[in-house]
């Protein structure tokens, strides 16, 4: 990389994902934080005052003293923006930044299924970044998106299994409280309870993986042809989404085959030296009772997905369980990794 | 029913399920508690002293003063035994009671898959009780079994859907702490966590429903021909197992069809006047976020299963969610209901 | 009581305490619900539509079809109002009802320390209702208040100990989530955590008991002369506030004395036949590990306080632990009991 | 320090505290692990096999391959033993090690109140180590003890306040699950609940601080003359004991005085360069709602106590709240810090 650090703005910096982005940029070897944006209520005051800081590590000093700017491209001293905006705000704001020449790497759902916009899991479909170049020639800038937190876990967990030919995929999720933001879920709703519904989540899980595993063509991304069906639950866990999967495959397999595929999987990003990339993005646990959210969510600093409990069922499906840290790999960390990938490929 | 109450022994009366059976018999209109058995450690002392009483309602006075007997047929003043024994103890002990002429209605797993022994959900396969008569002519007594707590929930939830022709069934469970007995799950294991494994549970869910929905023939029960695959998780909920189901059917259906099947389902036991039988064994909730363990587990005093979230998925499956109170309908209440059914049919 | 039921309005009927009042009036032998009021947003629609019903029991049918009225005396068909208003609203609204001739029995904190207004725990200071008569001659109506949920528990728990001469009282509370209303405490704040602060709560605990135990004089209530110091915590429990008390007394005592005082305490309301009054308002548990919120909160349908763990400390204090169901005895049930007391004394 | 590392045995190495000691020694600059002991069941197998490893960090490789030895001095290659034994085992075993010339630094309660044995909080009573020298001349070795987990928190939190002259101290604790070891508290006991009793805990809190703050004389330690009274509760928190204190002082004070004492407190160990010593052993938080277990337990890697919510009460007491990480500063970390102090003072 070049000696000087690339300047980055964080859009929607006061929310939980925004905070994690700000924290991650504090001592990043390639990037530096140059601007933070927020809602009208926050704009004009210092970030330290505007934010209800939720992370264990302290708020970075240089960030704390920055003045929060409105979420608009004027006066933002950067050409790259990491977006942690809410979807309704993101829809317009990210386009405005794109038109102003920014490259926006976004965790928001607003543009994920836009045919012009790539939806990236770096280990899986780095080639889809070609869409960013096409946007740039059309708009002057580009929007690149990070999938939904559960969808990233599902995609990474499926990556080693592509050799089997996935035909269909049923997933039931047990999702953590932090996925709902703050204040999010009321304690009275989840105490001694499970909520069997998360608005909009099943639709995302049923659509986003098809794009991630799709093929890039001159006309855009052609979705992968398997189907996904999802049932999403909220459980009383702080962090870490657990996914219970059932996979129908094209090709026959044994339990041992699957375990071997998981064990032997290595990151295709190995040669790029991306600071946030885990050496092993998929960790296979042999124990009968893993992965568990509390024990496995921080694997590789939260950037790896942990899988286990592989079984071949009476119906011939592959059953297994996967865990993803929803606010790290599933949000801020995934977004940052895309930015690193783009920097390494000289797309930023 | 006859004017005098039928005497009942409770085997394994000191455990949580045993306690619920003792409590249920305290003011039962047809039955009365006449004996309690326990381990060697408990035998010879009063039940009140031997038991660590876990229920909210007080320990029934007549039970408290009974002397706990060893778990053997000698000296037990009853001809019917409700068994809450642990599986390893049940294997021998229930046979001993059967040989001594007792009818044993058991919640233990030991004999559930024994071809001579019926596995009963009263609303579904009362006809399988024919196997009890066959045992009686061979052994002098009989063993009748109640399915696993999650399996009961699954079977009842599937009952209204038989018209669709079930081909395969995938289920992911979120099971309550009380299912593991006491002391059961360590708090350190489940705090801020999910355990994605319950020993032996998936095997039960994958086999027992096939027998429940099987056909009784002269040779015994012929299993139903669908497949079940299960992934079982333990979550930090006191009571109430949640089941997330995905069903492939023989016949095409719409979401509205399924909801209608659930709504219109009525108990085939209606005419029998069984005291513990719920009028509606399957309750359909229209809300997007139901069933929930804390809100729905006590429906019909814990004897009904609540279902909701019916959806047709992109793969054409039926997705829905079901909830069963694991220690009531899924254990003591289910066992008692079988005894009531047998009494009403003059099999006790 | 007279044959016809007394009509009652519930002010602030859509909140959790309001819901409990509505439910309690549904089949009350002396009272009947005649009106419900709510915020401007709710006024004009049916109660069934306006309310997010949180209780296990179903919403009473007659209540569900009532049209929510604005919280003002005009057009309210009743002369008694049970108030579950928030404090800021209550300050003005309850006075308006009083001026219009209503007797307002209120759970709100707004007027609790008003020298004209009695603050009542029926078992302790029924005589303070004299203040209601004085208000009535001045304003045409009256406001009568129910103490804070923790303060009620503290007062009832102290009632049997008055013979010892209380000099000072230190209390640390572990308060339930339902005390904060809905949505109340964010699940992320209380998961794997304790919040050592509840705004305004310590002040209430340090002042209200002095008034409850005060003497009624012609000039008003003269506060009791002991001191209270409080530290209030929020813990991850659904219902039931636990109070850990340390009491300095005027007179010497032994542990056995205290236990005996608790055991022998009986309600002074015995002769009045109040429907909601517990026969034993203070239940003493002998076990080393009681009271516990989940096991003891529903004692006497939530209307009794449970105490235990009496100890004399090295400093000569009396230590003990008390539990009160915060939304029953500590709120709706306490309010209703005051209304019943007033009805029995022909003050309504 | 000398160039070569001091060899250390860990007694009772398979329990949770033992594991933390093993982990802490893995990369300690002054010490190295040379032996691990366990129960007869564990002895003879490798530590990696014998232990159910509970920590997030991996088991150190050199420890994993060590053969677990019986808990007896023969054949232990070390002259210092860190003890995480259970109290009943510790009583005899630690004396055997002492007689064999070992210095035993123990987290067990067995010898804490033994007049010959010092009970050390390094920041408070390092001078009491004089007792170790006296033991050595009598027995050839010495036992030095670390207080109970809550007592350490209480002592450190009180250290800055000594200038006020403490007369009496009332404390109510909200203690974490990990304090009970593994499997420890049953999840059914603590779900939606608080346990108001921890066997033996109140006695420790009421006695140990008096020894820690006592004066060393030629006859031994003369206890401090204040009194402590304690009420101990178990709450559903993983780690971190919260203490709610009420302090009567000899000298008058204002709230500001107390906050200033906390803010200005610095460790008296500053000059010694102890690796585990926190720079600020007491951290004062200004926010109204701190300390909180989840947010503050890891302050200074779990070695500092966090205090807050200072208030002067109507009775003139000082109220405040303190938090200690019970398995770090309150157990393994505290034990290790004593060993470091002794090494720095050339007592090891």
Image (tube, coloured by chain):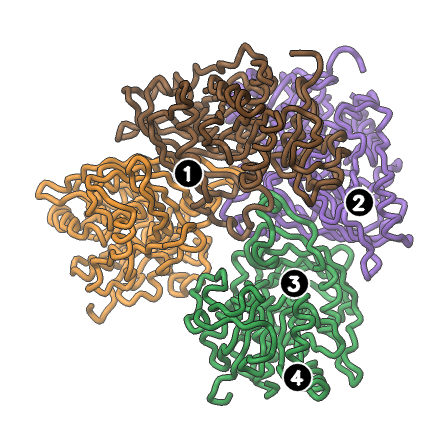
Chain colours: A brown, B orange, C green, D purple
From the viewer's perspective, is the residue at label 4 or at label 1 nearer? 1
CA separation in Å, label 2 and label 4: 58 Å
Mark 3: which secondary structure? helix
* Above or below: residue C232 compared with residue A41: below
Asked whether disc 3 touches disc 4, contact meaning CB atoms under 8 Å apart, the reply is no
On residue C150, the disc is 3
Lower sequence index among marks 3 and 4: 4
Q: Are the residues tagged 4 and 1 within 8 Å (C-beta)?
A: no
Element carrying mark 1? helix
The answer to whether dots 4 and 1 both sit on one chain is no
- Which residue has dot 1 on it? A203
Callout 2–callout 4 Cβ contact below 8 Å: no
How far apart are the alpha carbons under marks 3 and 4? 28 Å
Q: Which residue was labeled with disc 2?
A: D210
Q: CA distance from mark 2 to mark 3?
A: 33 Å
Q: Secondary structure at mark 2?
A: helix
Q: Quarter-wise, where is residue D265 in the image?
A: top right
Q: Position of residue C156 (x, y in %)?
A: 64, 69
Disc 4 designates what residue?
A: C141
Q: Are marks 3 and 4 on the same chain?
A: yes
Determine whether B77 is above or below B111 in the image.
below
- CB-based contact (under 8 Å), mark 1 and mark 3: no
Q: Nearer the viewer, mark 2 or mark 3?
A: 3
Residue closer to the observer: C46 or C326: C46
Label 4 chain ID: C
Marks 1 and 2 sit apart, C-alpha to C-alpha, by: 62 Å
Tell me the residue at 81%/58% (across/down). D313
């Amino acid at each position: 990389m070049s000696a000087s650090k690339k300047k980055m703005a964080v859009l929607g910096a006061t929310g939980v994902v925004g905070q994690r982005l700000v924290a991650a940029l504090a001592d990043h070897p390639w990037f530096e934080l140059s601007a933070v944006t927020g809602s009208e209520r926050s704009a004009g005051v210092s970030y330290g005052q505007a934010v209800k800081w939720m992370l264990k590590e302290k708020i970075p000093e240089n960030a704390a003293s920055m003045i929060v700017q409105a979420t608009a491209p004027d006066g933002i001293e950067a050409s790259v923006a990491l977006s942690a905006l809410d979807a309704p705000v993101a829809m317009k704001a990210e386009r405005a930044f794109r038109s102003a020449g920014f490259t926006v790497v976004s965790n928001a759902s607003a543009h994920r299924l836009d045919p012009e916009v790539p939806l990236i899991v770096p280990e899986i479909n780095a080639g889809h970044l070609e869409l960013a170049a096409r946007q740039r020639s059309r708009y002057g800038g580009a929007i690149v998106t990070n999938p939904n937190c559960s969808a990233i876990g599902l995609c990474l967990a499926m990556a080693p299994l592509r050799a089997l030919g996935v035909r269909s995929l049923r997933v039931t999720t047990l999702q953590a409280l932090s996925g709902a933001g703050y204040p999010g879920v009321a304690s009275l709703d989840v105490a001694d309870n499970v909520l069997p519904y998360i608005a909009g989540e099943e639709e995302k899980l049923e659509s986003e993986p098809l794009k991630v595993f799709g093929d890039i063509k001159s006309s855009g991304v052609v979705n992968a042809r398997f189907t996904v069906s999802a049932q999403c639950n909220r459980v009383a866990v702080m962090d870490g989404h657990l996914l219970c999967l059932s996979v129908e495959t094209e090709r026959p397999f044994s339990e041992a085959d699957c375990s071997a595929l998981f064990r032997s999987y290595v990151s295709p990003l190995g040669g790029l030296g991306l600071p946030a990339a885990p050496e092993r993005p998929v960790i296979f646990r042999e124990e009968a009772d893993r992965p568990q959210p509390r024990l496995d969510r921080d694997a590789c600093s939260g950037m790896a997905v942990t899988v286990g409990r592989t079984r071949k069922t009476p119906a011939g499906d592959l059953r297994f369980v996967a865990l993803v840290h929803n606010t790290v790999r599933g949000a801020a960390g995934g977004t940052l990794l895309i930015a690193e990938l783009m920097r390494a490929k000289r797309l930023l």
